[in-house]
Image (cartoon, rainbow, N blue to C red):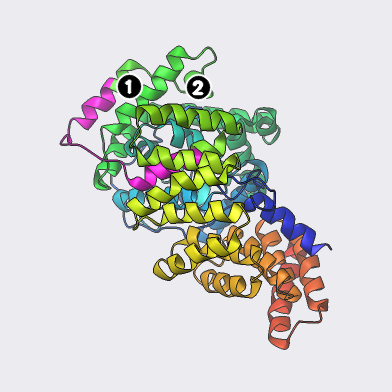
Amino acid sequence: MKLKAFLKRSLSCLLSAALLAIPVLSWSTDPVPSLILTPPKFTPKAPPAFINSNGIQTSGLPDLGNPSASNLSPAEEAELGKQFMIHVRKSLPLLQDPIVNDYIQNLGARLVSGADFPNQQFYFFVVKSNTINAFAGPDGNIAVNTGLITDSQTEGQLAAVMSHEIGHVVNHNVAEGMAMSKRMTYATIAAMLAGIAIGAVGGGDLGAGAIGAATAGNISHKLNFSRENERDADQVGMQILANAGLDPYAMAGMFQVLYNQTRYSPTPPVWATDHPLTESRIADAQNFAAHYPKKHYKSSTEYHLAKQRTQVDMVSNSKKLTDHYQRILKKYPRNPYYHYGYALSLMKARQFTEAKDQMIPLVKAYPDQPIYQMGLAAIERNAGEYKQALAILKPLYALYPDYRPLVLQYAYTLTLAKNPKEASRILRQEQIDRPDDLQLLALLAQAQSDAGNKANAYATRAKILMMMGENKRAIQSYKVALEQSDTNESTKLMIKSQLERLEKLEKKKS
C-alpha cells in the first residue's frame, strides 16, 4: 500500500493549491468527490404544526425525503443517510472550500433554529454545479449548488431556497415509500436516491443508471403527488425565514430570478419543465410575504465573501476572471467584496504581488475580519512564502482557535513549512470536536506521515476509507498500521479494536 501516494492524491484534490502549483481561492482545483467537509450537525426543537407538504423543488430537484415516519428507528434512519452520503461523495463534485462550506453550514443552522423541528439533525454541503438548485436527502443531509450561491442576489434569496429544503426533510415522501420496501437494503435505497440527485444536478445518464426504470417511475409518481402542496411550503419557508431574522419577501424575489431565467433561456433547466414557476406562483409568494412587516434586510459580510470565493472557484479561465473584476471595479471602485474577489482571481493567475496589493488594504481597513487576513496568508503560501504566511496565521489562530477554516489553513501551512508535528497537534485537538471531519482527517494523515508517525497515519487513512464506504481497503490499511515499527501498545490496542469491529461488520454483509 502506498500511503504517501494516497495522502498526496487526497490532499492535492482537497486542499493543495500549492502542491499543484496552481494558487486558487479555495483549497482545491479538482476536488475528490469522495471526501467532503463534515461540520457538526445541528439539532433543533419542535416543528410548526402546519408543515404538511413537500415544498418547492428548485431546479426540478426532487424531495429525497426523510424516512423517520416510515417505521424506521433513529439508527436505521442514520444508516440510510450514511449510505446516501457515501454515494453522493463518490458521484457528485463537492466544493472543498472550508470558508464557503462553513458559511453555508452556519446559515443552515440559523434557519434550522427558526424552523423548530424536533429531534432532527441537519448537515449542509455544497455541490459544484452552475445550476440554481438545492436538494434534501435522508437524515437531514441538504445540498446547495454553487449556482444558487453565485446567482442569488441577496442572502435572503439563498436562504429562501434552503428554508424549503429544511422543510423537505420532515415531509417523509420518497424515502418513506422506498424504506418501506422490505426487499431493498438501505444501501440500495441510498444509491437510488443519490442517482436521482446526480441526474438532477446535471449528471444525466450517470444519474439514470443509478436507478432502475420501475423505481424511477415510482419516484416520479410520488414527486408529482408532492407538488400539489407547494404553495403551503412557500408559506412555511417564509415563516422559517422570518423566524431566523431573514427576509420573507426574498422568496418571491428568488422565484422571479428563476422565472426570468426560464423565459429567456433557449434551453430551460430541468426545473422549468418538471416544476414550472408561473406569474401566479410569484404573486402568491408576494401575497404570503405581505403578512410580515416590510423592512430593509442587509446581506451579511460572510455571504458576500462566500459569493466571491464561489465565483472565482467556478471560473477556470484566470484572464476572464481578472478582466471581469477590473470592469466591475471601474463601476464600483469602493466595494470591498469586489476587491477581495479581484485579489483571489489575481492569486489564481499567479500574480501574487498584484494580489497582495488588493488584499493588504482590506486587512488594514477591516482588522476584525479574519477572512481577509487568511486571504493574505493564502497568497503568501501559494507564492511559497511559508514564513510570512505563518506570521499571519499564528496570531490569528490564537484569536480564533475555534474557526474551522482557519484551523485547517494553519495546519496545512505548517505541514508545507516542514512542521508536521505542530500541525498534527493542532489537528488532533480539533478532531476532539469533529471526529468525522474528512478534510481534517486527510490533513491529519498527511501531517502524521510527514512527521514519521506511520502507524497513526495508516490508521487515520483507514478511517477515511471506512467513511467513504471502502471497508475492505480500510481493513487492509489497519493491518498495515499494526506492522509499523512506531506502533506503541496503546495505539495497537486502538487499531486492533477498530479492525475487529470492521471485520465483524464485513462478515455480517457476506
As drawn, 215 above or below 116? above
Is residue 318 magenta-colored?
Answer: no
Residue that label 1 marks: 281
Q: Circle 2: is it few (<14), some (14-19), or many (20+) Cα within 10 Å?
A: some
Amino acid type for the residue under numbered disc 1: Arg
Find residue 307 and report its image quarter. top left
Residue that label 2 marks: 274
Number of numbered discs on residues? 2
Residue appearing at x 61%, y 35% in the figure? 198
Between residues 16 and 211, which one lies in front from this camera angle? Answer: 16
User: Which quarter of the figure is the C terminus placed in?
Assistant: bottom right
Q: Circle 1: is it few (<14), some (14-19), or many (20+) Cα within 10 Å?
A: some
**Residue 60 tag number:** none
Q: Choose the circle earlier in sequence order: 2 or 1.
A: 2
Between residues 174 and 162, which one lies in front from this camera angle? Answer: 162
x and y, in percent, of residue 164 in the image? 38, 38
Tell me if 429 is positioned left or right of 88 in this view: left
Q: CA distance from mark 2 to mark 1?
A: 15 Å
Residue appearing at x 41%, y 44% in the figure? 305
x and y, in percent, of residue 181 in the image? 60, 44
Tell me if 176 is positioned left or right of 361 in this view: right
x and y, in percent, of residue 351 in the image? 58, 42
x and y, in percent, of residue 405 in the image? 49, 58
Q: Secondary structure at mark 2?
A: helix
Magenta stretch, residue numbers = 283-310
Q: Secondary structure at mark 1?
A: helix
From this viewpoint, is residue 181 visible? yes
Amino acid type for the residue under numbered disc 2: Asp
